Structures are given as structure tokens and as C-alpha cells.
């Protein structure tokens, strides 16, 4: 890879502009590149096994979030600000952390930033970083096949939440077990979080969001529990899930019309920059997950800020020439009117 400028307005210190020759087997990591050799097994599909514990817990969570909406008018302004802060922090733990840093290694982060992102990831409570990154690499490598954990070809509900309510397809387990996760095992922050995950989610996802408003500015426990804790948690979950569901079904495909992931502006807004999904599946190693840098992409803004502070570096980006060539070769033509 050569060092070079960016096609975007990003400011991440020390960027790498990726050219066409870097795409494919020459990349450092290939477990997030679609495997064209994988074939689904012939014969009947395995029976669907519902995990009723998860069904009950997810139902209670969403009922609690709905109940929390009715507390919004009585919440103190500081509580609403705190809820937004918790939303943004936990979302960054997924987008800048589990996704762009640990799943795709699209940039490098120094220890203080990795610790912050791991703590924020525990606040998001979407499985530990190791498991999240493993499943996400499998999602890219076997996208929309039986080996994809949230296979969108099985419908909106399955790819949004249903995949968490039933046993994994045997191919997900088999292929996921063959992915190279040595980089994750070598990261002490990732493995520390994995070892202490249950305690960390109890503290960061439930206790801290609830106790801060109650202790520091006298918010009622009910409001503190239902808004910055339960409602915030449910919103972050669904914003993330929409990337798996809506962004695989609704939108245009300016980079590759042969894959289902789409460019979806509404998802990008809710998931703080993760809705440019046709681009992301075409160039999964780009730290911005978008051609347009910081536009509608708060996660990229955050990583760029960390770069200015000296905490993020080596941000991989795709050259203008490579992007244009890919649009002309495999895009759906929508870029001409964009």
C-alpha cells in the first residue's frame, strides 16, 4: 500500500490510500472478503430451533423501552443529555470499536483508545468484542448464505433480530470456527473484556447509566432506569440491527449491483455512519466505511478526532481512481445522478 492523500475530508493522521492492486489476496487480512468458493449444502435445511430465553428477554427489553418513552416528558434535561451521551458512547463502542477497529482492522488505535472503546462496547451489550468481530467477519466472508450469522436472504425479521432468537445454522458455527482470529486473541484489551464480560455489562450497560442521574442530579430511579438505561440500550441495538436488515434491502448499489447491501441514508443517520453498506461490502477495509468521509458519519468524525489527538493512525482509505473504476465496472449507475 502506498501512502497518499484522501478523496474525503477525513483528517485521520497517517492514512494509507488503497489502490486496486491491494484488493483481494494481497491484503493483510482476507477473512472479511467474500468467499466465492463456498457452496451451501444440498438437501433439506436444518430445523429452526427457537431459543425461548432470548425471546423472553428481548420481549421484556422492548416492552421496557416502550414503557420508558412515557417517562420522557418527566425526565430532567440533564438526564436526556446523559441518555444521548450513553447512546453515542455505546454506539461508538460498536462502530469505531468492534466494527472498524477489531473486525476490519481499518485503522490502528493506541491503548487508551482501545480501553475506551472496549468499555463503551460493554455499555452497548451486543456480545463481547471477540464474538462480535468473529460473527462480523463471517458475515462478510459468507454474506447472505447459510454461513452468514444474520443472512438477509432469510428475510427482514431474521436479519434484524430473528438470528438472535434461534440457534445458529451449523454452517455459521463450522465456518466461524475456521476464521483466523489470532489478532483478536493477541489483543489483551479484547481478551480482558471477554474474560470479564458479564461483570462489565452489568456495570456499564445497566448500573452506570442508571446511577449517574440518580446520584448526581437527583433524577428518580425509575426515569434513570428506563431512559438512559433501557430505552437507550434498545435504540442502540435496533440502530445496529438495521445495518443487517434495512441496509441489505433498501437503497441503491452504486459500487456493486451484484451484492445486496445498499446505501441507506436513514440507517447511516441512526447508526452514526454505518449505512453506506454497498460501499462497505465492496471496500470493507476503508476506515470510513463510506466514500464521503465525515458526511453523515459521526464515527469517522470520532476516528479523525482521535487521529488529531495521536490515538488513531494508519487509517486505510480507497483511492478515487479505484472507487470510480469499481462504480463504472459493477455499479448500478446511480452514482451518475448522485
Image (cartoon, rainbow, N blue to C red):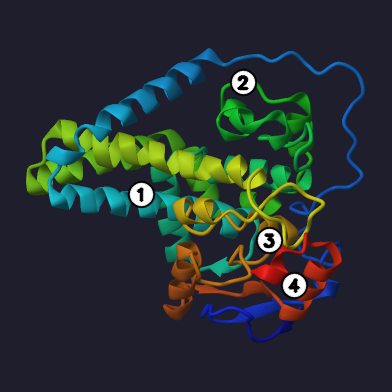
Marks 1 and 3 sit apart, C-alpha to C-alpha, by 25 Å
Marks 1 and 4 sit apart, C-alpha to C-alpha, by 32 Å
Marks 3 and 4 sit apart, C-alpha to C-alpha, by 9 Å
Q: Residue placed at 35% from the left, 49% from the top?
A: 87
Q: Secondary structure at mark 1?
A: helix
> Is residue 180 placed above or below 312 in the rendered structure?
above
Which residue is at the front of the view, 333 or 75? 333
Residue picked out by circle 1: 87
> Residue 133, image x and y in percent?
62, 47
Q: Residues within 10 Å of mark 1 (few under 14, many from 20)?
A: many
Residue picked out by circle 2: 166
Which of the two labelled residues, at mark 1 and mark 4, occupies the earlier sequence position?
Answer: 1
Residue 230 placement: quadrant: top left
Q: Residue placed at 37% from the left, 54% from the top?
A: 88
Which of the two labelled residues, at mark 3 and mark 4, occupies the earlier sequence position?
Answer: 3
> Is residue 220 placed above or below 168 in the rendered structure?
below
Residue 279 is marked as 3
Which of the two labelled residues, at mark 1 and mark 3, occupies the earlier sequence position?
Answer: 1
Which of the two labelled residues, at mark 4 and mark 2, occupies the earlier sequence position?
Answer: 2
Q: Residues within 10 Å of mark 3 (few under 14, many from 20)?
A: many
Which of the two labelled residues, at mark 3 and mark 2, occupies the earlier sequence position?
Answer: 2
> Residue 41, image x and y in percent?
89, 26
Q: Residues within 10 Å of mark 4 (few under 14, many from 20)?
A: some
Q: Secondary structure at mark 3?
A: helix
> Is residue 13 placed above or below 78 in the rendered structure?
below
Residue picked out by circle 4: 323
Which of the two labelled residues, at mark 2 and mark 1, occupies the earlier sequence position?
Answer: 1
Position of residue 273 in the picture relative to residue 31 (left or right): left
Residue 23 is marked as none
Q: Quadrant of the N terminus?
A: bottom right
Marks 4 and 2 sit apart, C-alpha to C-alpha, by 38 Å
Amino acid at each position: 500500500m502506498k501512502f497518499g492523500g484522501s478523496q474525503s475530508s477525513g483528517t485521520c493522521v497517517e492514512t494509507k490510500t488503497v489502490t486496486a492492486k491491494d484488493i483481494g489476496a494481497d491484503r493483510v487480512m482476507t477473512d472479511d472478503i467474500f468467499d466465492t468458493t463456498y457452496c451451501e449444502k444440498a438437501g433439506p435445511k436444518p430445523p429452526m430451533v427457537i431459543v425461548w430465553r432470548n425471546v423472553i428477554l428481548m420481549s421484556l427489553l422492548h416492552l421496557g423501552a416502550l414503557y420508558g418513552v412515557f417517562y420522557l416528558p418527566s425526565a430532567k434535561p440533564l438526564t436526556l443529555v446523559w441518555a444521548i451521551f450513553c447512546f453515542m458512547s455505546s454506539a461508538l463502542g460498536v462502530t469505531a470499536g468492534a466494527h472498524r477497529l477489531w473486525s476490519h482492522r481499518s485503522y490502528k488505535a493506541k491503548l487508551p483508545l482501545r480501553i475506551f472503546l472496549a468499555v463503551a462496547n460493554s455499555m452497548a451489550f451486543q456480545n463481547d468484542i471477540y464474538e462480535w468481530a468473529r460473527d462480523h467477519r463471517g458475515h462478510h466472508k459468507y454474506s447472505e448464505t447459510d454461513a452468514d450469522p444474520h443472512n438477509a436472504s432469510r428475510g427482514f425479521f431474521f436479519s434484524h433480530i430473528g438470528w438472535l432468537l434461534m440457534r445458529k445454522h451449523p454452517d455459521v458455527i463450522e465456518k466461524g470456527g475456521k476464521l483466523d482470529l489470532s489478532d483478536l486473541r493477541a489483543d489483551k484489551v479484547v481478551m480482558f473484556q471477554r474474560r470479564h464480560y458479564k461483570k462489565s455489562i452489568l456495570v456499564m450497560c445497566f448500573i452506570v447509566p442508571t446511577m449517574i442521574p440518580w446520584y448526581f442530579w437527583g433524577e428518580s430511579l425509575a426515569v434513570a432506569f428506563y431512559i438512559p438505561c433501557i430505552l437507550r440500550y434498545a435504540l442502540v441495538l435496533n440502530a445496529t440491527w438495521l445495518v443487517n436488515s434495512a441496509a441489505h434491502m433498501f437503497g441503491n448499489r452504486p459500487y456493486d449491483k451484484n451484492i445486496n447491501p445498499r446505501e441507506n441514508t436513514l440507517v447511516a443517520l441512526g447508526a452514526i455512519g454505518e449505512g453506506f453498506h454497498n460501499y462497505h461490502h465492496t471496500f470493507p477495509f476503508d476506515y470510513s466505511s463510506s466514500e464521503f468521509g465525515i458526511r453523515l458519519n459521526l464515527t469517522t468524525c470520532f476516528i479523525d478526532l482521535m487521529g488529531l489527538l495521536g490515538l488513531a493512525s494508519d487509517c486505510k482509505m480507497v483511492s478515487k481512481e479505484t472507487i470510480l473504476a469499481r462504480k463504472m465496472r459493477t455499479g448500478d449507475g446511480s452514482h451518475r445522478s448522485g
